[in-house]
Amino acid sequence: MTKYFKKTLVAAAVAGAVAAGIPGTASAYVYGLSSLDITNFSITGLPSTSVTTYTFTETNTATLNGTSTIQSATCNGTVNPSITTTCGTSPVLDPLAAQLGTATSQNNFGFVGTGVEYARADAIITTAQLVNGTPSSISTIAEDNLITGTNASDLSQLQSTTNLTFTVGTTTAFNLSFLADADQRVAIVASLSVSVVNVTYNAMTNRHDYPNSPDGTCKALTVI
């Protein structure tokens, strides 16, 4: 359907978050994993002057046996009336992984598994349409495993906010689409894995939320 915007500024945000948590247990090991990849994220059909500014933020948090660590990064830019950015090009944004216990490599979005004790969270924005002109893609992972410890949890979160300006009284329609691939795994008892994608449009006082909690490969979402 076509939206008639009564205000001139619209904020569009997409946030991806993955979390895995393990309470205390006497099992030989307790494992939790949640990962989320978003690819081909693009906005099409907008007038070239509609996009004004954008901000990307990533936060990785890990907790293991009462000790916590947080790693975060943010960047921003303008598209109109001039082009500026504090983001990188390849990758666009890449904070340090939050890791406790036995560490793995930065940007390891494979599964470490159950052999050692750890809690970790990692995220990366590989490409961004507003920065390098290609559809946006991100990877996030939250994974933990207990062998002798009592509790672990982790969270990898990414938020992108883009400001769009429209002319009052005109009709503007655009398409937003992406592919989301999520994986959740738990082993033994009392382990929790969660993955969520939220898309929010805020046209001043008119807010539109499109939550999506995938359990596998999701179809592209198109919102007009």
Image: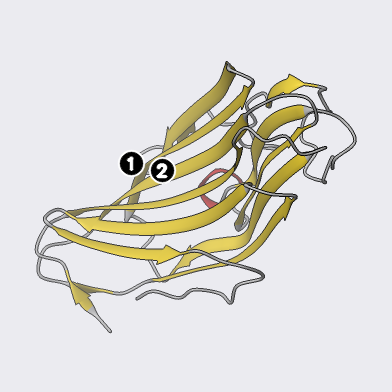
* Left or right: 116, with 14 as reference point: right
| Nearer to us in this view, 83 or 32 | 32
Q: Write the residue at 59% across / 36% down.
A: 23
Percent coordinates x, y for residue 146 in the rendering: 75, 32
| Nearer to us in this view, 8 or 213 | 213
Local crowd size for mark 1, using a 10 Å CA cut-off: few (<14), some (14–19), many (≥20): few
Using the image, determine if residue 200 lies above or below residue 86. Answer: below
Q: Quadrant of the C terminus?
A: bottom left
Q: Amino acid at mark 2?
A: Val
Quarter holding residue 6: bottom left
Q: Write the residue at 58% across / 17% down.
A: 66
Point out the residue furthest to the bottom here: 1
* Left or right: 112, with 167 as reference point: right
Q: Secondary structure at mark 2?
A: loop
Q: Which mark is residue 81?
A: 1
Quarter holding residue 50: bottom left
Local crowd size for mark 2, using a 10 Å CA cut-off: few (<14), some (14–19), many (≥20): some
Q: Which mark is residue 79?
A: 2
